[in-house]
């Protein structure tokens, strides 16, 4: 079985393909939302697999770590120049994509205004999500561990 983030990307891409000549707003909104959640779940899996181990994905410990990542906390870490200074530039690139997708997902899910994205814009966001997930997959173990720790443990200021 493929990972959840892979399945969410398939859904997002399928929604983009179902639009025909005139994009259906609901499909575009759902595609953007699915793309963001693919990235978020990839981040959650990175943390749980790194700390507990992927072979333990059915354990309570793995599930607890997986569910321990928060949307707001991830955004805070991924936009902090202090936090990002310990990582290769690719993590900052991931952060840029994460923040953009989070903002677009919130607009897609909650705004009652007409959705401004059309087929090309939505498709581009879906591909940015796919690229962001690739970045996570290529991180060295030391960076994976450090990122998981940064996402799950609040740094003390004193």
Image (cartoon, helix red, strand yellow):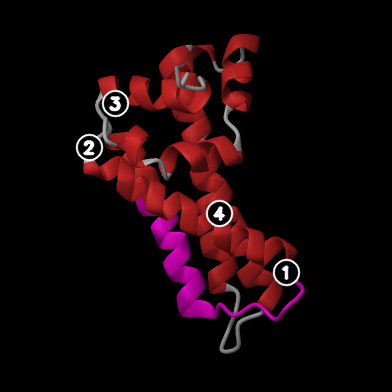
Q: Which mark is residue 111?
A: 1
Magenta-highlighted residues = 111-131
Image location of residue 73, percent across then percent down: 55, 35
Verify CB contact (< 8 Å) between mark 2 and mark 3.
yes
| Local SS, label 1 | loop
The residue beneath circle 4 is 102
The residue beneath circle 2 is 88
| Local SS, label 3 | helix
- Image quadrant in which you'd find residue 111: bottom right
The residue that appears at 41% across and 54% down in the rendered structure is: 97
The residue that appears at 65% across and 59% down in the rendered structure is: 106
Q: Earlier in the sequence, mark 2 or mark 1?
A: 2
Q: Image height check: is 85 above or below 6?
A: above
Q: Residues within 10 Å of mark 3 (few under 14, many from 20)?
A: some
Image location of residue 101, percent across then percent down: 51, 57
- Image quadrant in which you'd find residue 136: top left
Q: Image height check: is 150 above or below 55?
A: below
């Amino acid at each position: 079985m493929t990972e959840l983030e892979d399945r969410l990307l398939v859904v997002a891409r399928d929604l983009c393909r179902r639009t025909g000549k005139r994009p259906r707003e609901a499909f575009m909104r759902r595609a953007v939302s699915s793309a963001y959640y693919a990235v978020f779940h990839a981040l959650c899996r990175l943390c749980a697999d790194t700390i507990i181990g992927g072979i333990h994905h059915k354990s309570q410990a793995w599930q607890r770590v997986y569910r321990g990542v928060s949307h707001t906390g991830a955004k805070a870490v991924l936009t902090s120049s202090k936090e990002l200074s310990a990582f290769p530039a690719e993590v900052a690139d991931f952060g840029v994509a994460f923040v953009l997708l989070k903002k677009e997902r919130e607009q897609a899910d909650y705004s009652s205004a007409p959705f401004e994205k059309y087929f090309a814009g939505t498709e581009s966001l879906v591909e940015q999500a796919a690229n962001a997930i690739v970045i996570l997959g290529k991180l060295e173990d030391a960076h994976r561990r450090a990122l998981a720790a940064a996402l799950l443990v609040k740094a003390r200021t004193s």
